């Protein structure tokens, strides 16, 4: 039995995994600099890391994945509960027994000739009562290098696990990287995860989507909190007042960009602070507000489109201590991607000589991994054990048509409907077709660890759990005109919408009531310094009654697939909106 930990359950689990997978060595990760040095050398030797130009990008490396392993695989991701109804129509399901049998057969001897790394980690500040710990076992040094950036990994996490006695078990092996033998299995009732056959972020860094969303959402329901696919930012006014906002947009729909926004020039004295860009855990405080932490310690962000114009804060973090996955490189070995600048790359994301005939040079889902501490707008409030108080929750998606730039829900229950009714065009973050509108409630379609009907019931229950809940809003940066151009400039100019949202939360600005929610009057949005024709702003703030009635019918049909379990309160909210639309059209 291993003497690396005083926690008997952990020691036993590690021993049993070693017996099943038969690694050559077992290495317990401490998170030390020497360990990182050793792993980096190993990764360079094996070719899993390629050095980048040390003058322009010190301590930064390029990893090129297997070309068949570049995104999350939703069709191979399962929630394994004894009762299928508990996983819900939103998840692929298998019984725990069948899932264990299937995946254990693939783990047998899978680590022969490899080192098995044991990574204790903490999701959230190490001393926060909202944080939760886990241990990932993996045979990928690339995964260790990423987990070191994305979580609080090593000795302090192990100490907390030994103190508390509980942890989420995550077993990962890259297996043979074959999509035929790839599965991402979750056992919420056992607080465990088993993943094989992929080295890609969301499939392999088990602290992130697998633990911090799928398993955590399940735990959060029983414990009275929320685990969400949300960024957290702080908006500071010239008077020095800071309001925190959490926002859920589907994968590759703008969370990182909004979290690091730099206000337009006309916003003198305003500042956006970054708390997190992807995951938010929140629970009611004694003051009746929701208090949130970012469970991650780094950013695993979309690379393409990141530039001096769109996201200067992100660009500035990427000049050192960064792992790039599946980007292109220039002649002098700098990382390069579409949208960065007008240089021509030398090699593409598969290491081939760049040829535009082969498609984009950087994979559309190429990613950077970098510590939060490298972000110029990162706030030390992100390390506060109690978290930050949330004034507004924003939902949003990519919608070419219909959905206005911004609207506010009329109540908490209506806001839950707005979240449940979210839809967005699919992106390269998951395998499959890109650009199709699909329902993605609360941006959690790929990440909710249980039946969405129960999840909405849980959301609704906060009306009784907290008496100072945030306002709920919906935004859409992605409306297009007849020429396929974006109607709203987006990025830094999204500040104008954030300002209205925070003013609404303080009761400082009025709004127009419509069937779908409260909208700003065009004059209520600050467009100083923005060249936007007034007709275009009006179009962005229009509610197309007929279009919305059709949308509500589609939402009703979607929610109907949840059958008897769908909360009555959600049906009632839906009916209210439909009735008002019908009245307006009569
Ligand atoms: P995940 O990490 O997959 O969860 O994604 P994310 O939600 O953090 O998305 P991210 O901020 O990385 O943005 C994804 C893509 O959307 C990038 O290519 C951005 O350039 C683009 N994008 C972000 N914000 C805006 C915006 O306001 N307008 C437009 N037109 N594009 C945007
Ligand atoms: C997403 O797909 O929403 C991501 C990237 O943030 S991954 O961590 O791979 O899930
Ligand atoms: Mn994400």
Image: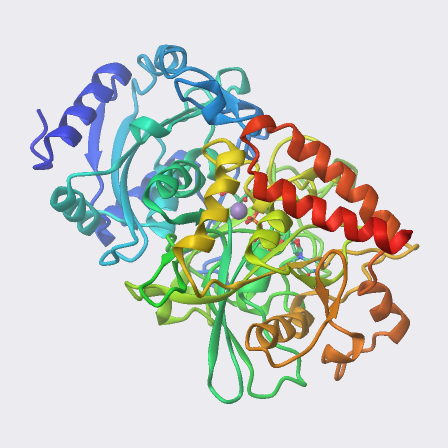
Q: Nearer the viewer, residue 312 or 343?
A: 312
- What residue lies at 25% left-to-right and 55% top-to-bottom? 129
Q: Nearer the viewer, residue 504 or 264?
A: 504
Give the left or right position of residue 131, taking residue 197 as reference: left
Which image quarter: residue 205? top left
Give the left or right position of residue 88, taking residue 534 as reference: left
Which image quarter: residue 195? top left
- What residue lies at 47% left-to-right and 28% top-to-bottom? 198
Which image quarter: residue 297? bottom left
Q: Is residue 34 above or below residue 358?
A: below
Image quarter (top left, top right, bottom left or bottom right) of the N terminus: top left
Q: Nearer the viewer, residue 146 or 548?
A: 548
Q: Is residue 183 above or below residue 101?
A: below
Q: Could you say where residue 539 lies in the image, as x and y percent from the top left?
A: 86, 64
- What residue lies at 62% left-to-right and 53% top-to-bottom? 414
Q: Could you say where residue 465 lies in the image, as x and y percent from the top left?
A: 39, 54
Give the left or right position of residue 468, taking residue 303 as reference: left
The colour style of the image is: rainbow
Q: Is residue 281 visible?
A: no
Q: Nearer the viewer, residue 481 or 68?
A: 481
């Amino acid at each position: 039995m291993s003497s690396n930990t005083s926690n008997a359950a952990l020691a036993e689990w590690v021993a049993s995994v070693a017996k099943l997978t038969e690694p050559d060595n077992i290495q317990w990760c401490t998170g030390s600099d020497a360990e990182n040095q050793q792993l980096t050398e190993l990764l360079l030797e094996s070719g899993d890391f390629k050095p980048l130009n040390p003058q322009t990008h010190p301590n930064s490396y390029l990893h090129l994945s297997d070309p068949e392993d570049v995104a999350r695989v939703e069709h191979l991701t399962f929630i394994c509960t004894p009762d299928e109804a508990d996983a819900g129509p939103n998840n692929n399901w298998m019984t725990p027994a069948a899932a264990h049998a299937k995946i254990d057969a693939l783990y047998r001897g899978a680590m022969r000739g490899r080192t098995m790394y044991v990574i204790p980690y903490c999701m959230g500040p190490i001393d926060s009562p909202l944080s939760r710990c886990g241990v990932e076992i993996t045979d990928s040094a690339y995964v260790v290098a990423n987990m070191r950036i994305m979580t609080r990994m090593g000795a302090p996490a192990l100490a907390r696990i030994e103190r508390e006695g509980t942890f989420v078990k995550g077993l990962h092996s890259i297996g043979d990287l074959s999509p035929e033998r790839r599965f991402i299995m979750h056992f919420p009732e056992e607080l465990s995860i088993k993943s094989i056959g992929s080295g890609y972020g969301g499939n392999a860094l088990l602290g992130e989507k697998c633990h911090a969303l799928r398993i955590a959402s399940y735990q959060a329901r029983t414990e009275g909190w929320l685990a969400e696919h949300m960024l957290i930012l702080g908006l500071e006014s010239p008077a020095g007042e800071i309001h925190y906002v959490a926002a859920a947009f589907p994968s590759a729909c703008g969370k990182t960009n909004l979290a690091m926004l730099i206000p337009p020039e006309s916003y003198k004295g305003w500042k956006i602070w970054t708390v997190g860009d992807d995951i938010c855990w929140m629970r009611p405080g004694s003051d009746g507000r929701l208090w949130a932490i970012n469970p991650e310690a780094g950013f695993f962000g979309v690379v393409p489109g990141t530039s001096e114009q769109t996201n200067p804060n992100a660009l500035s973090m990427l000049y050192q201590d960064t792992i790039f996955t599946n980007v292109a490189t220039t002649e002098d070995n700098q990382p390069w991607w579409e949208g960065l600048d007008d240089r021509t790359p030398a090699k593409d994301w598969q290491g081939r000589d760049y040829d535009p005939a082969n498609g984009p040079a950087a994979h559309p889902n190429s990613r950077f991994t970098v510590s939060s501490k490298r972000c110029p707008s990162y706030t030390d409030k992100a390390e506060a054990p109690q978290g930050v108080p949330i004034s507004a929750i924003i939902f949003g998606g990519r919608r070419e048509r219909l959905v206005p730039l911004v609207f506010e829900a009329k109540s908490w229950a209506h806001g839950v409907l707005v979240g449940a009714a979210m839809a967005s065009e699919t992106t390269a973050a998951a395998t499959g077709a890109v650009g199709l509108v699909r329902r993605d409630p609360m941006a959690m379609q790929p990440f909710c660890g249980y039946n969405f009907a129960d999840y909405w019931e849980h959301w609704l229950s906060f009306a009784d759990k907290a008496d100072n809940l945030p306002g709920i809003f919906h935004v859409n940066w992605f409306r297009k005109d007849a020429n396929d151009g974006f109607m709203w400039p987006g990025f830094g100019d999204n500040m104008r919408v954030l300002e209205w949202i925070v003013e609404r939360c303080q009761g400082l600005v009025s709004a127009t009531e419509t069937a779908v929610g409260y909208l700003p009057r065009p004059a209520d949005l600050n467009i100083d310094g923005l060249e936007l024709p007034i007709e275009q702003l009006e179009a962005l703030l229009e509610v197309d009654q007929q279009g919305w009635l059709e949308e509500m019918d589609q939402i009703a049909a979607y929610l109907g697939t949840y059958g008897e379990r769908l909360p009555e309160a959600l049906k009632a909210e839906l009916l209210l909106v439909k009735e008002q639309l019908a009245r307006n059209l009569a």
